Amino acid sequence: MNLARRALAEFAGTAALVAVVVGSGIMATDLSRDAGVQLLANSLATAAGLAVLILILGPVSGAHFNPVVSVAAWVLTRREAAPAMRGREVTAYVPAQVAGAVAGAVLANAMFALPAVQISAHDRSAPHLLLGEVVATAGLIVVVFALARQDRAALAPVTVGSYIGAAYWFTSSTSFANPAVTLGRAFTDTFAGIAPASVPAFIVAQLAGATLGGLLLVALYPNSPQPVPGSAYQAAADRPR
């Protein structure tokens, strides 16, 4: 039941995150035809929404909302006495995150009186966009887990939200950095959408970025992380199994 509760938090949090991303994109395009204004509105809403969701749901599940974060937490701490994630927890989190992402896109479509299920036609297959995803995801992994190793996990809401908001602007891909969110955004043919044909390459780029980020993290912080309540490392470890 405890694992089910944490998986529910991951489902709800990922759904809310995608609803924020997609919904704010729809609202931005309704209010302005200026692409810069649209991206600014979308990035600010996403950064703020992500920070709030981490703050509220972090104590329940660790607020991963992202398969690469969950897998990285398992890989980076699996040899610890109290690992942040175990294999069975990853297998519960990832499907919940994917389902939540799709549900969030459908919800955003419905809130703006669009067909609930759409298939995006927004092609994002250019190589420079994939490079942007590698960079965005590598940076995200370093940010999330460096906080834990610095004993600053309490700063995760503002730090992770700020990083994603900034990465909207400094990466060519606008920083999806999340395989579940990428899949969810294929179900909306709006500002935030991505064509299904572009999804596999994006996910491969995100996995590559997560690997690079993990290697960089270990090089920068070679010591084993200390347990930090509320962090992506420790959130799951604190709770009875």
Image (cartoon, helix red, strand yellow):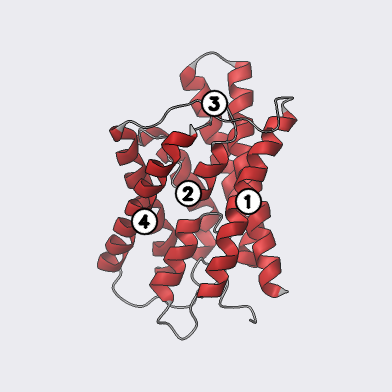
Marked residue nearer the N-terminal end (3 or 4): 3
Viewer-side residue, 30 vs 43: 30
Marked residue nearer the N-terminal end (4 or 1): 1
Q: Which residue is mark 4?
A: 210
Marked residue nearer the N-terminal end (1 or 2): 1
Separation of marks 3 and 4 at Cα, in angstroms: 26 Å
Label 4 is placed on what type of residue? Ala
Q: Are marks 4 and 1 in contact (CB under 8 Å)?
A: no
Separation of marks 2 and 3 at Cα, in angstroms: 18 Å
Label 1 is placed on what type of residue? Ala
Q: At numbered mark 3, what does the secondary structure look like: helix, strand or loop?
A: loop
Marked residue nearer the N-terminal end (3 or 1): 1
> What is the x, y in percent for residue 112?
72, 26
Residue drawn at 70 percent across, 25 percent down: 114
- Residue 157, above or below 109: below
Q: Which residue is mark 1?
A: 99
Q: Which residue is mark 2?
A: 179
Question: Which quadrant would the C terminus be assigned to in this image?
Answer: bottom right
Viewer-side residue, 156 vs 171: 171
Q: Which residue is mark 3?
A: 191
Q: At numbered mark 1, what does the secondary structure look like: helix, strand or loop?
A: helix
